[in-house]
Image (cartoon, helix red, strand yellow):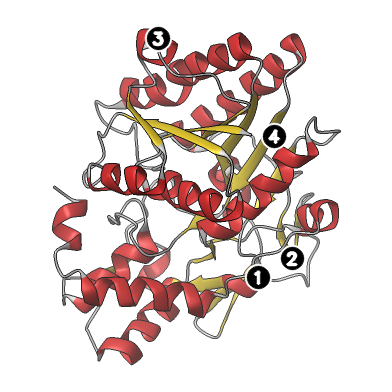
Amino acid sequence: MRILVAGCCGFVGSALCQAFRELLEHASLAGFDNLMRPGSEMNRSRMRALGVQFFHADLRSPSDIALLPPADWVIDAAAIPSVRAGLAEDSLQLMGHNVAGFLHLLEYCRRHNAGLLLLSSSRVYSIEALRSLPLRVQDRAFRLDNSTALPAGASLAGISPEFSTRAPVSLYGASKLAAERLALEYGTAFHLPVWITRCGILAGAGQFGTPGQGIISYWIHAHLRRRPLRFTGFGGSGHQTRDVLHPRDLASLLLRQMRAGFPSSPQVWHAGGGIENAISLCRLHDWCDARFGPHSVSADPSEPPFDVPWLVMDCSATSAWFGWRPAMALGQILDEIARHAEAHPEWLEISQA
């Protein structure tokens, strides 16, 4: 099996390459990256050590993509992944990567008759619909309140793919929805296997965290280094809650999808930590206090335009179809990041270079 990973020097792409090397001993692995993200250059040598054939290429350049070797499967982990992206002058850059650049990847799949595994996002769901969910506070975290009727696609297990995607979803969310639709159309037009996986928060050791992206990693590193921290939005309570998944567990699902070949309907799946791996920001801060010692946090009640109070992925359909469920518990993920933070005091500077 020949696998090509777009964005192989990012956190998710590099973690997938390592997992595939362990799970698929005889697979041919190649990857490309434009090394634009601060810290991504560090993973180039890691790719070499894993035996991944590395190409310095930019998804936005058709000539770069034309030089890549043939593959049986392409994994798109190259998107700009921040929901805050595109809010200023970089909106064209966001669409250039996530839509126009993605078209070049689809053309690569067409030329080489390659299957596509698109890593999409939980942030394709309607912000207004998510903010309208009935919530209560329990154990210092938002919880879904099912004492009233819930909208389609919402249950105590989380949000399913049937939940509303009506606008607004943010420019980032719109770019991922556009990529999903393009992928499905290419798959139908050119008879290509296409699997779309909407991911919850992905986190683990080696993630380059910032306040707008990789928040779990950022919070742990910043707490350990006694950087200023604040709860923003929703009254400054820190009750906003998300679920967390380790990329290695994502890799096991992608491997199942590749082995399945052509998907039958549906073609959109969820990969997240689910209720068992859900945590609020203030509970994460509590965990850090217990691990590193107390550290103060401030409150900012202002409402960022695209934040949501609660978003947990319901992966029950994925589990039933593929026999898949996350193997790494939330505590293990947090501990892995903490050990990495203790061993790399320079990590925040590298992430934000």
User: Which label's residue is closer to the chain start, 4 or 3?
Assistant: 3
* Image quarter of residue 314: bottom right
Q: Which residue is mark 4?
A: 195
Secondary structure category for the residue under label 2: loop
> Could you tell me which quadrant the N terminus lies in?
top right
Q: Position of residue 29 (x, y in %)?
A: 50, 37
User: Which label's residue is closer to the chain start, 1 or 2?
Assistant: 2
Q: Is residue 329 left or right of residue 218?
A: right
User: Which label's residue is closer to the chain start, 1 or 3?
Assistant: 3
Q: Which residue is mark 3?
A: 62
- Res 225 seen here: yes
Q: Which residue is mark 1?
A: 275
Residue at the outermost front position: 26
For image coordinates 62% across by 61% down, the residue present is: 312
Task: Check disc 2 and give the amino acid type.
Answer: Ala
Cβ atoms at labels 1 and 2 below 8 Å apart: yes
Q: Which residue is mark 2?
A: 157
Q: Position of residue 337 (x, y in %)?
A: 36, 71
From mark 4 to mark 2, how far is it between C-alphas? Answer: 23 Å
Task: Decide which of 248, 27 is in the foreground and name it.
Answer: 27
* Image quarter of residue 75: top right
User: Which label's residue is closer to the chain start, 2 or 3?
Assistant: 3
Point out the frontmost of discs 2 and 3.
Answer: 3
Q: Position of residue 48 (x, y in %)?
A: 33, 42
Task: Decide which of 226, 142 is in the foreground and name it.
Answer: 226
Q: Is residue 169 left or right of residue 92?
A: right
Point out the frontmost of discs 1 and 4.
Answer: 4
Crowding at dot 1, Cα within 10 Å, few <14 / some 14-19 / many 20+, comes out as some
Task: Decide which of 238, 49 is in the foreground and name it.
Answer: 49
From mark 2 to mark 3, how far is it between C-alphas? Answer: 42 Å
